[in-house]
Image: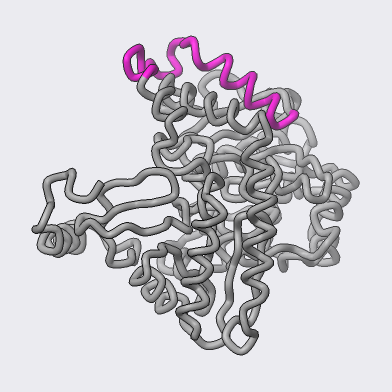
Amino acid sequence: MAGSQGYGSDGARAARELRAQAQLHGAHNYHPLPVVISEAEGAWVTDVEGRRYLDMLAAYSAINFGHRHPRLVAAAQRQLERVTLVSRAFEHDQFGPFCTELAALAGMEMVLPMNTGAEAVETAIKTARKWGYEVKGVPANEAVIVAFEGNFHGRTTTIISFSTDEDARGSFGPYTPGFLVVPYGDLGALAEAVDDRVVAVLVEPIQGEAGVLVPPPGFLTGVREICSARGALMIADEIQSGLGRTGTTFACEHEDVVPDMYVLGKALGGGIVPVSAVVSSSDILGVFKPGQHGSTFGGNPLACAVAREVIAMLSTGEFQERSAKLGARMHDRLSGLPRSAVRQVRGRGLWAGVEFAELEGREACERLAALGVLAKDTHGTTIRLAPPLMVTEEDLDWAIDRVEEIIR
């Protein structure tokens, strides 16, 4: 694959020029590794210099099915030849089937499609508030939503208002009211916080950005019970954890919990187009009337066509099974790393947070990139590993061998 974009022997110079352009003209809201990718296929990517890397991040789970999966590319190409956008001013032939199929996958009744994960979270917030006023009977403008410390649900002004990450929150006030934040995993604190004004509890079944934190056993069950007892909605943000990543279709399934609302995104677009959605019951999403919420691109024909193929691929259970099986192997190997170098390994399925004893996460990722493995750091000494679900056992072992190498 190397050189097919015309870089050839000038790849090193092209890499320098492309990075310089990005740094000069692109706002510095990210701190990417010094890798300039030009091609990708499956679990592997190639940079402009012709070097290949195993992708162990999968775009924060947006590439669950690998780069350019043939079924997803074919679905996109078929739709590109027909119609890509009509806005929601008109119906199109992909919308109804998409909503029906996604609702069935989630065991729900209705779907409200958007584009990005943050848009879907905003939609869930609006849904919960409207439901709270019109169904639960909370006095106007008094609705409260409870979230958890360490959360990551996006970076809009409303969402950062209940973030505890100062990098995401600092210097962006004034903040949106109507939120309470309690410690993640603390059912006692949650029970104390949920009063008659609380319309919803927004929870990540596993906190990804915080370092792939898995809550204590029974936590999700407890959240479900508290919400049911107090008449509040349980909203599960499964944007990163859902759609096969943890070895089940949804991470809530590990405790046999069914939330009132799923918030989905990332992998739903197959790594081709941004697709997100809120999935819930008709009693909840039915609060919306025409004109009260929308998106020009949300639920567009191209997005629906790709997402329908994603849903079809998940419906066989193949990817969930691969995630569970290979995830067990990955965690077994990572757990065998010396505790003098690795303080803790967390996660489920093909998703792991590796917390080093002393090595900074950024440095670890730079060392791994030099060895041909792409990962991403988060919060100091932790890196995240989340390969595409179609990664081979051999490639996975090779990547973990490289992790062993950087700590030796």
Position of residue 356 measured from the top left corner of the image (x, y, whole percent): 56, 81
Residue closer to the observer: 268 or 351? 351
Residue drawn 59% across and 55% down? 177
Position of residue 330 measured from the top left corner of the image (x, y, whole percent): 62, 62
Position of residue 132 measured from the top left corner of the image (x, y, whole percent): 73, 38
Which coloring applies here? one colour
Residue drawn 59% across and 67% down? 353
Q: Which residues are magenta?
A: 78-107
Can residue 166 be seen by looking at this rendering?
no
Can residue 135 be seen by looking at this rendering?
yes
Residue drawn 46% across and 28% down? 71
Residue drawn 17% across and 61% down? 15
The residue at the far right in this view is: 229
Position of residue 165 measured from the top left corner of the image (x, y, whole percent): 53, 68
Asked which quadrant contains residue 357, the reply is bottom right
The residue at the far front in this view is: 394
**Figure check: 73 above or below 164:** above
